[in-house]
Amino acid sequence: MFSGKTALITGASSGIGAEMARQLAALGCQLILVARRTERLDALAEELSKVSVQVITLDLSDPLAPQRLFDEVARRGLKVDVLINNAGFGFQKPLLAMSLEEQLGMVDVNDRALLALTRLFAQPMVERGEGWILNVSSVSAWFPIPGMATYAASKAFVQTLSRALHEELKPAGITVTTLSPGGTRTEFSCKARGKMDPSLEKAMMPVEPVARAGLLGLARGQSVVVPGMLYRFMTGLTRCLPDTWVVRLAGAVMGRHR
Ligand SMILES: NC(=O)c1ccc[n+]([C@@H]2O[C@H](COP(=O)([O-])OP(=O)(O)OC[C@H]3O[C@@H](n4cnc5c(N)ncnc54)[C@H](OP(=O)(O)O)[C@@H]3O)[C@@H](O)[C@H]2O)c1
């Protein structure tokens, strides 16, 4: 389905974004790779040189970055068929252990940039009557997490927005899919937690099936994709348990600090 299309992937310099780039390239999809680390993006572009790959270095925490990215894509004469809003990060720290700047920076990348890019790139997709948008959320979107409150709230924003847009943009021929990974072996957890808690390490999924599930869900027109049986069970369970239990449990498992 994505052969001959052009996909723009934010956060393509590592982890889930880089793996999606590899899987899309294998399908014959052209790529626009976006992140801050140019050398990583250049190396990936070289690795995937069988397809056309454009690199755009950008810091998405800058509120002007989404418009700059949209303008740069137009300046290069490219059209984006598939938008993958994957760039994001989180800190596993209590509210008062983080500066306000750190927290707002997280919201700027995880939410503000994602909303702006969705708004900008959806317009020409609607005009063409075709397009695919994959927004990367997290299982954290299902429940508030004491000890990781801002990150979980930022991903709940992604999920709520994207589920609504799935219905809103469907009549215009646009598919909007939310990918909600659980723990996935990428650089994310090192940045979020420092050293990984060994008990959580056991629940981590490799990056390949997570990226594949997201792309497959997008191709099939699914609204929400949760990769892995464990995480599907976990998100299902949150619908059966009382809210207060869910929040306390989430804090005990995912928000604990060492
Ligand atoms: N790994 C997990 O356990 C997990 C679980 C649930 C959800 N997720 C979500 O999955 C997505 C991908 O994360 P990952 O696990 O693949 O982690 P990762 O390996 O750390 O990748 C994060 C990507 O986001 C980019 N990024 C971060 N800040 C940016 C900024 N200011 N401007 C532009 N790009 C920025 C990074 O590129 P540069 O540093 O080069 O800019 C990198 O390419 C995130 O949205 C994350 O919240 C991850």
Image (tube, rainbow, N blue to C red):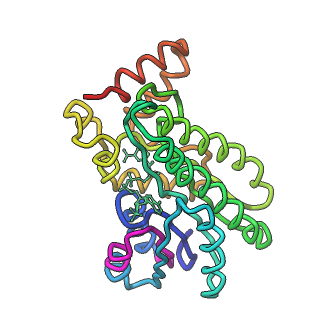
Q: Which residue is more in the foreground, 229 or 76? A: 76
Name the residue located 56 percent from the left edge and 62 percent from the top edge: 62
Q: Residue at x 49, y 77 (%)?
A: 56
Provide residue 189's location: percent of width, then percent of height. 31, 45
Residue 130, position in %: x, y? 71, 68
Please check the rendered image and state whether residue 177 is part of the magenta-colored stretch, yes or no. Answer: no
Q: Is residue 127 left or right of residue 234?
A: right
Residue 78 picture location, percent across and down: 62, 83
> Is residue 16 positioned above or below 53 on the image?
above
Which residue is more in the foreground, 212 or 145?
Answer: 145
Write the residue at 34% across / 56% down: 208
Q: Residue at x 35, y 41 (%)?
A: 183
Q: In which of the image's four quarters is ligand 1 placed?
A: bottom left
Query: Which segment did they paint magenta?
Result: 28-43
Observer-nearest of 192 and 209: 192
Q: Quadrant of the N terminus?
A: bottom right
| Image location (x, y in percent) of residue 85 | 55, 58
As drawn, 222 above or below 7? above
Foreground: 141 or 100?
100
**Residue farthest left in this picture:** 198
Q: Quadrant of residue 36?
A: bottom left
Quadrant of res 26 = bottom left
Q: Is residue 30 magenta?
A: yes
For residue 171, side relative to residue 115 (left or right): right
Q: So how many labels did they put on this image?
A: 0
Q: Quadrant of the C terminus?
A: top left
